[in-house]
Image (cartoon, rainbow, N blue to C red):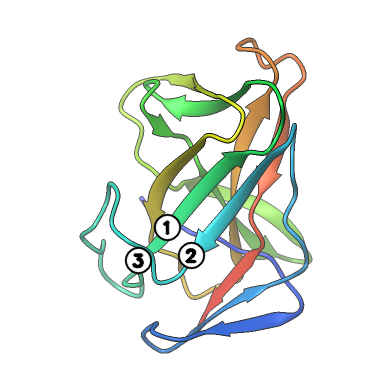
Amino acid sequence: MRSTIGLLCGVLVLAGCSGGASIVGLGGTIARDVSVTVTIPGRCVFTCDPPGGDLTTLALVTAVNHGATPRYVRSCGGVIPSFEEQDYIGGQWQFVGSADACVSGPEYIVLAPGDSVQSNWFPPKTLSRITIAVATDSAFVDGGLAASRAVHLY
């Protein structure tokens, strides 16, 4: 399954990426005190073998709870954070799929204050970003969507 991250504007060029990469600042979105960041190149946490094609640059995705109380983030089977990929298409962000292949239904991971969860992603060569559903309870009644800043590989 294809993995992607992104957002748009003010460019910071990162060294060490094949061909180059930009993390652009059309601003990420913090939801319920949880932020999502992308580091390129990233260290291997889960998925280390590139799926092929243009998807060859390993990124590290991190969601952090900056709040004073626990937060719930969607997960794959309660173990792997369920990060979703969005591409910037036709002037708006559109979901294109999960950044991770889930084998069991979406559950949740509890993030204590200051805790984080991580996963890997192979961003495409399009303007993309990573999101994750966040809530203050396990029923996700007040759920929000935390999003990374945009990533653009070139």
Q: Residue at x 68, y 38 (%)?
A: 66
- Please tell me which residue is depicted at 25% across the width and 68% down the height of the picture: 52
Q: Residue furthest bottom?
A: 19
The answer to which of marks 2 and 1 sits earlier in the sequence is 2
Element on which disc 2 rests: strand
**Mark 3 and mark 2 in contact (Cβ < 8 Å)?**
no
Instruction: Tell whether label 3 touches label 1 (CB within 8 Å).
Output: yes
In the foreground, 86 or 130: 130
Whether residue 26 sits left or right of residue 72 in the image: it is right
Crowdedness of circle 1 by 10 Å Cα count: few (<14), some, many (20+)?
many
Q: Do the residues labelled 2 and 1 touch (CB within 8 Å)?
A: yes
Query: Against 79, is 11 above or below?
Result: below
Q: Disc 1 designates what residue?
A: 60
Q: Position of residue 25 (x, y in %)?
A: 74, 70
How crowded pointer 3 is (Cα within 10 Å; few <14, some 14-19, many 20+) is rated as many
Where does the image place residue 139, in percent across and percent down from the top left? 64, 10
Identify the residue under disc 2.
Answer: 39
Residue at numbered disc 3: 58
Can you name the residue that lies furthest to the left here?
49
